[in-house]
Amino acid sequence: MKVIAETHSHTVACSHAYSTITENARAAAQKGLHFLCVTEHGPAMKDGPHEWFFKNLPQAVPDELEGISILRGAEANILDYQGTLDIPDTDLNRLDWVIASYHTVCCEPGSKQEHTNGWLSVASNPLVDVIGHCGDARFDFDFDTVIAAFAQYGKIVEINAHSFDCRPGSKKRCREVALLCKKYQVPVVCSSDAHFYTQIGKVQPALDMLREIEFPEEMILNIDVERFQKIAQEKSPKKQ
């Protein structure tokens, strides 16, 4: 089992990442991937790109680079516990792949109930495609209630391999999230959250965890070309 799409990647548009879109696409091609999602941080991140980055992205970046299909997207920052995002709806509406994530530099962690309310608001936002690295223990929430809502609203949950090493409690909590995704039939993607081209497609810890819990392969969207192509087509036209 291996991924055919990198669903979460960053570029030099923010100063804590170190590769260009082209370098990331070239790395994806060299590793036999078929798709690359360009998901730069939203502008509320301290070094995130200006909002014009997202306005121009659909026009400036082609559908294909280095033989790789490009999904032009974003990792929008969730700013509060009402689900407010830092990229305007008009721009999100034109992107192919929108991840929404909590980061401590953009939203101070609150109570478990506040985090639960925030994720429920994000779940109901039709412009959000993917739930970003929700295993972070700093943003604890009612897993059962929220993941049932992800199922209700057709969200995809990201299993972020990078989180296993850098976000508190994520290795154990991502397993709990995945088990509930299995229970509620919520599809997942495994991502590297790459900040340098050598990290593109490095998701083995996430895949290993899913294999350990016997997560249904048909619910892992980015291990099959036709399956991912279908979801990519569904996500993009709905925003036209």
Image (cartoon, rainbow, N blue to C red):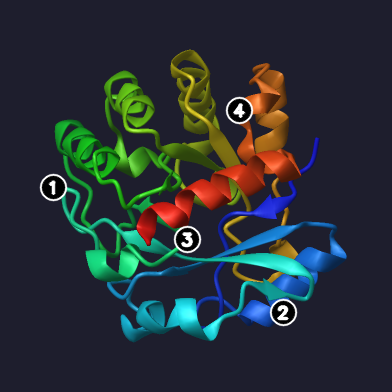
Report which residue position mark 1 lands on.
Answer: 82
Tell me residue 210's x, y (percent). 65, 27
Callout 4–callout 3 Cβ contact below 8 Å? no
First-in-chain label (1 vs 2): 2
Instruction: Of the two numbered discs 4 and 2 on the same chain, state the one appearing first in sequence.
Output: 2
Q: Earlier in the sequence, mark 4 or mark 1?
A: 1
Q: Is residue 185 visible?
A: yes
Badge 4: residue crowd in 10 Å (few <14, some 14–19, many ≥20): some
Q: Which residue is mark 3?
A: 96
- Pick the residue in front: 213 or 229: 229
Q: Secondary structure at mark 4?
A: helix
Q: Are marks 3 and 1 in contact (CB under 8 Å)?
A: no
Q: CA distance from mark 3 to mark 1?
A: 24 Å
Amino acid type assigned to the residue bearing label 1 in the image = Gln
- The residues bearing labels 1 and 2 have C-alpha atoms spaced at a distance of 36 Å
Residue at the spot of label 4 = 219
The residue type indicated by label 3 comes to Asp
- Numbered disc in front, either 3 or 1: 3
Q: Residue 199 lies in what quarter of the image? A: bottom right
